[in-house]
Amino acid sequence: MDGQNRYMAAALEEAEAAARRGEVPVGAVIVRDGAILARAGNRTRELCDITAHAEILAIRAASAELGDERLTGADLYVTLEPCAMCAAAISFARIRRLYYGAEDPKGGGVDHGGRFYAQPTCHHAPEVYSGIAEVEAARILTDFFKGRR
Amino acid sequence: MDGQNRYMAAALEEAEAAARRGEVPVGAVIVRDGAILARAGNRTRELCDITAHAEILAIRAASAELGDERLTGADLYVTLEPCAMCAAAISFARIRRLYYGAEDPKGGGVDHGGRFYAQPTCHHAPEVYSGIAEVEAARILTDFFKGRR
């Protein structure tokens, strides 16, 4: 398995773990220099915190780990297209590349909605690669919502 | 001083306190049923966390206080137009009304950039009132950046 797939596999594991906790199953991993700096799944319910999306938790953990609020040179892998909140946070953290799995036409903020990285108010845009493991990423979400009905 | 101005005055105090800590001076207050639920200033540098904007810290504190990730019926006062990250968080938290001071053409996400509340990917939009104490809010920011030069 090449690096890109290995890191997305770790993000998918985080999404599966989130589903087992009863959270909307999204997972994220931050990588720099070939090492995973942080990995997280969505914990909005557990933490009673609407900002506790996988990407935000991973960014906060990586910044704490490095003692640097900017994650210059780091890449973020996430199973679902980031929302507007997370898209902006990824920009503020100076993430170099964003790899995401499934598209999110209803709530995405990268290739849908306000498309933050295309705005003049965006001062750092990561390179974006989408559709990585998108079938698996979408399946985890679909199974989760099917199980809840 | 009427309620609206009193709450913005508290947000301005938080902005001034942030400036004294060497943080970009933005302050926010969350109010429900005539009481301040949470107040916060920007702490991105101190916490080494790019998500630690005043609005995010206030939302997290209010949710922790109430044990509820949704702040239905609560209003948020902030000295500067929220960025895309904070605009989305305000929506996710189901804030009823957003009152902000100065506009932020370079980084705002409410009336500039992706205008999150106008997007089909936004599923709850607060009522927005802008320009409250905007001269004072802008002055605190201008003085801060002047002092840094």
Image (cartoon, coloured by chain):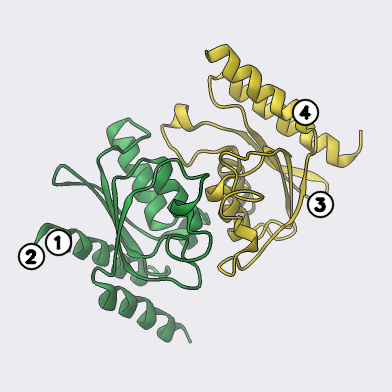
Chain colours: A green, B yellow
User: Disc 2 designates what residue?
Assistant: A1
Protein chain holding label 1: A
The circle drawn on residue A6 is 1
Work out whether mark 3 precedes mark 4 in sequence or the reverse, and give the earlier one.
Answer: 3
Crowding at mark 1 (Cα within 10 Å: few <14, some 14-19, many 20+): few
Work out whether mark 1 precedes mark 2 in sequence or the reverse, and give the earlier one.
Answer: 2
Residue flagged by tag 3: what amino acid is it?
Asp
Of the two numbered discs 2 and 3 in the rendering, the one whose residue sits closer to the viewer: 2
Direction from residue B110 to residue B12 in the image, left or right: right
**Residue A126 in the image: x percent, y percent?**
34, 49
Mark 3: secondary structure: loop
CA distance separating discs 2 and 3: 55 Å
Labels 2 and 4 in the same subunit: no
* Residue at x 43%, y 57% (from the top left corner): A53
Indicate whether A63 appears above or below A25. Answer: above
Crowding at mark 2 (Cα within 10 Å: few <14, some 14-19, many 20+): few
Q: Are marks 2 and 4 in contact (CB under 8 Å)?
A: no
Mark 2: secondary structure: loop
